[in-house]
Image (tube, grey):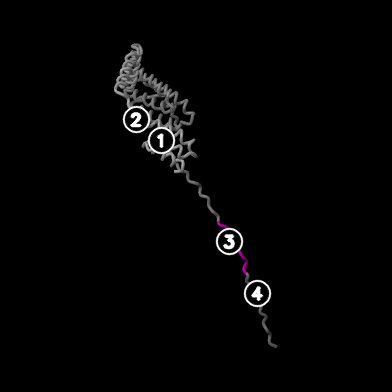
């Protein structure tokens, strides 16, 4: 704490306790009078305001004026018009109906009332999905299951297979985008399920080429190439050549 802060604190304490007045504090510290005066005057006003207490008559008069103001300008509650409330209610009911109907429609089979709703919801699903290939694979799987479920009814089976052929046509066009393996595996699974149920789909059989099936791998044995070792180099012997000797008989005289 510097000198000015200490002098200000002392003056505030003296003025608050009544030991000294504002002018007396300023007279004792003329070198700081210019800075002390506005601060001390503010402190004096605040202290006087604390001592002010409204009279009961003032309180009663103020309360009466407040009540009169509230009665003259009542706060109106925010209400909606009947038309707006009916519109909101209908929108909520329609949304609930759509959600519930769509959920029930997912288990519908060809020939049932909600089957058309199921197909429409699938189109909306495909349009909003970031993976249309995955959606088409799921839809094709659904059509296979539906065809198997209604296999006893030719008309309903034909309807399910017609939907499958539509999904198959889309998958053919999408197989060129690097999804060949993914689509091929799914189509093989469809072919196995339909064949097990006794349902033939020639278009599917033509789509799955014989080369798509798992080939039998016959290991190839590399030919054995004989390795010829170099013939040893014949080094002529270093022995001295053999010279034949001839013995001459000695004749005695």
Closest to the observer, 115 or 232? 115
Dot 1 falls on a residue whose secondary structure is loop
The Cα atoms of the two marked residues, 1 and 2, are separated by 17 Å
Residue 135 drawn in magenta: no
Closest to the observer, 82 or 12? 12
Closest to the observer, 245 or 35? 35
Q: Which mark is residue 51?
A: 2
Q: Which quadrant: the N terminus?
A: top left
Closest to the observer, 242 or 38? 38
Residue 235 drawn in magenta: yes
Mark 3 or mark 2, earlier in chain? 2
Residue ranking furthest to the top: 83
Picture quadrant where residue 148 is located: top left
Residues in magenta?
A: 229-237
Compared with 246, 174 (above or below) is above
**CB contact under 8 Å: marks 4 and 2:** no
Compared with 4, 130 (above or below) is above
| Circle 4 or circle 3, nearest the eye | 3
The Cα atoms of the two marked residues, 1 and 3, are separated by 133 Å
């Amino acid at each position: 704490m510097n000198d000015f802060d200490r002098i200000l604190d002392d003056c505030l304490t003296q003025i608050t306790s009544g030991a000294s007045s504002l002018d007396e504090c300023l007279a004792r510290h003329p070198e700081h009078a210019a800075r002390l005066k506005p601060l001390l005057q503010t402190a004096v006003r605040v202290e006087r305001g604390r001592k002010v207490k409204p009279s009961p008559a003032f309180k009663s008069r103020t309360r009466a004026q407040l009540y009169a103001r509230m009665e003259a300008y009542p706060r109106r509650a925010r209400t909606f018009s009947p038309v707006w409330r009916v519109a909101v209610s209908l929108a909520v009911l329609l949304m609930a109906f759509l959600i519930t109907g769509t959920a029930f429609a997912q288990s519908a089979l060809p020939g049932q009332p909600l089957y058309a709703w199921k197909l429409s919801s699938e189109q909306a699903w495909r349009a909003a999905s970031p993976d249309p290939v995955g959606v088409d694979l799921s839809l094709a799987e659904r059509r296979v299951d539906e065809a198997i479920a209604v296999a006893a009814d030719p008309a309903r089976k034909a309807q399910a297979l017609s939907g499958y052929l539509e999904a198959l046509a889309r998958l053919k066009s999408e197989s060129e985008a690097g999804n060949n393996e993914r689509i091929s595996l799914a189509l093989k699974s469809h072919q196995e399920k339909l064949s097990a149920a006794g349902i033939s789909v020639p278009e599917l059989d033509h789509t799955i080429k014989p080369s798509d099936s798992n080939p039998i791998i016959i290991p190839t044995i590399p030919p054995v190439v004989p390795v010829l070792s170099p013939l040893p180099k014949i080094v002529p012997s270093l022995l001295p050549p053999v010279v034949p000797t001839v013995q001459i008989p000695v004749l005695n005289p």
